[in-house]
Image: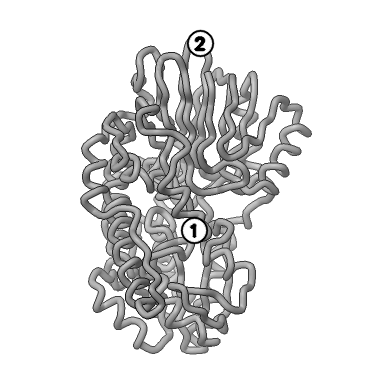
Amino acid sequence: MIIKFCGAAGGEVTGSKHLIKTDKGNILFDCGLFQGRRAESVQKNLNFLFTPDEVDAVVISHAHIDHIGVLPVLVKNGYKKDIYLTDVTDELSRIMLLDSARLQVEDAKFFNKIHQKDGLVIEPLYDEDDATKAFGFFKKVKRYESFYPVESVEVKFFNAGHVLGSSTVSIKIDGTKILYTGDIGRRNQLILKRPEFDKDVDYLIIETTYGDREHTDVSGVKEVFADIINKAVKNKGKIIIPSFSLERTQEIIYLLDSLRHEKDVFPIPVYVDSPMSVRVTNIFNKHIEEVDFNNDFTTYSRDDKDPFGYEYIKYISNKEESQALNDMSGPMIIISASGMCEGGRILHHLRNSIDDDRNIVLLVGYMAENTLGRRLKDGAKKVKIFGLEHEVYSEVRSMDFFSAHAGQSDLIEYVKEINPKKGILLVHGENKSRAGFKKVLMDNGFKNIFMPDYGEEVEI
């Protein structure tokens, strides 16, 4: 059995693709979009380290774009077999991929328009028709129930506690069991249940996004958030929040709603400028079984029947309303995708607001290397948006309270709980993060720890 690491390896955090090759058949775990420098991203997202003919089945851990975002490219290139995922991930992936396709088409159209005189042209990776064709190969399976994507290979989904519908995946082949974590959540979260894992694992493939550090204690999030809001109110500025439509937006809205009800902040106008966020929030309400019934959110939602603020938060759907926000004066909060500032409406809000020192850009998620979000987080004074340079005068703040990824202490506790017998493979983390986590694992007595490179094959 060979595992070929075709993405989110070698220090990369996005573009998850792991191909498990066996004499029974080959299974691809996740098929995600790589995000980084434009030229490198295009190359990696169009050219896989395998051919569609090599893949006998695809298994999806969750609906984030860096785990599903190039499924339409795979299908365009000739893949015509099953794509296995949970029912919630199926529902969310349809929304996410259609939105990704639409944004790519819109961004390419806008980029080409403003660079027409320069002769610069970009093309979307796929359109909505391509995404829809991929849906024809979706095959829903239930958590905890065995399924066999190829003959004699048993696979099960367990709750990963990362985002709605997310799963860890166990694979049993000829008596050897591999556990692939996908992305895994924290033990103490705002909304979701903690992760679950299969037992008697031989090899563990684990994400290490925060393998070398901890998150700030979530108990202080309201106080920090209130201070930021009150500052924007005082300065009559805008708070621009790049946010993933899945999970992060719902957490932010819940906190805003609770702060408003507790009267800790001025009732500042809030705009969620993402049609997808509305649909995802409705799915969230539909699948209440994913919620941890012992956390504060459940208590709050019992008392407040509108925890996602439909009463007063303005959900923006059409382009005209989105554009109008740029001409409006603060104070206000604008929540928009994409979370790493790599596409979508957030780019328009940033380019229209980032040169005003009254405004605050609030980063609430992980920012991969070479993304616009990462450059802002690292303190860049000038950034390019749609290929045009903008000076950064807005205050840039970063809050990691919201992270849906496990921090170092959670990760080590999970490894202890799983207790893999034969080896641990570290993926989905920058090299500094992977190396830091490898050291902690070794200090805790674990051996046979590997940091696979991009394109590397590991025989087990």
Residue 242 lies, with reference to residue 237, above or below; the image says above
Residue plotted at (40% across, 69% down): 335
Q: What colour scheme was applied to this rendering of the protein? A: one colour
Residue plotted at (31% across, 29% down): 142
The residue carrying pointer 1 sits among few (fewer than 14), some (14 to 19) or many (20 or more) residues within 10 Å by Cα, namely few
Q: Nearer the viewer, mark 2 or mark 1?
A: 1
Residue bearing mark 1: 39
77 and 365: which one is in front? 77
Query: Is 395 on the left or on the right of 409, as rendered?
Result: left
Q: Position of residue 451 (x, y in %)?
A: 66, 36
309 and 4: which one is in front? 4
The answer to whether the residues at label 2 and label 1 have Cβ atoms under 8 Å apart is: no
Image quarter in which the C terminus is found: top right
The three-letter code of the residue at mark 1 reads Ala
Query: Is 434 on the left or on the right of 278, as rendered?
Result: right
Q: Position of residue 289 (x, y in %)?
A: 34, 40
Mark 2 falls on what kind of element? loop
Residue bearing mark 2: 175
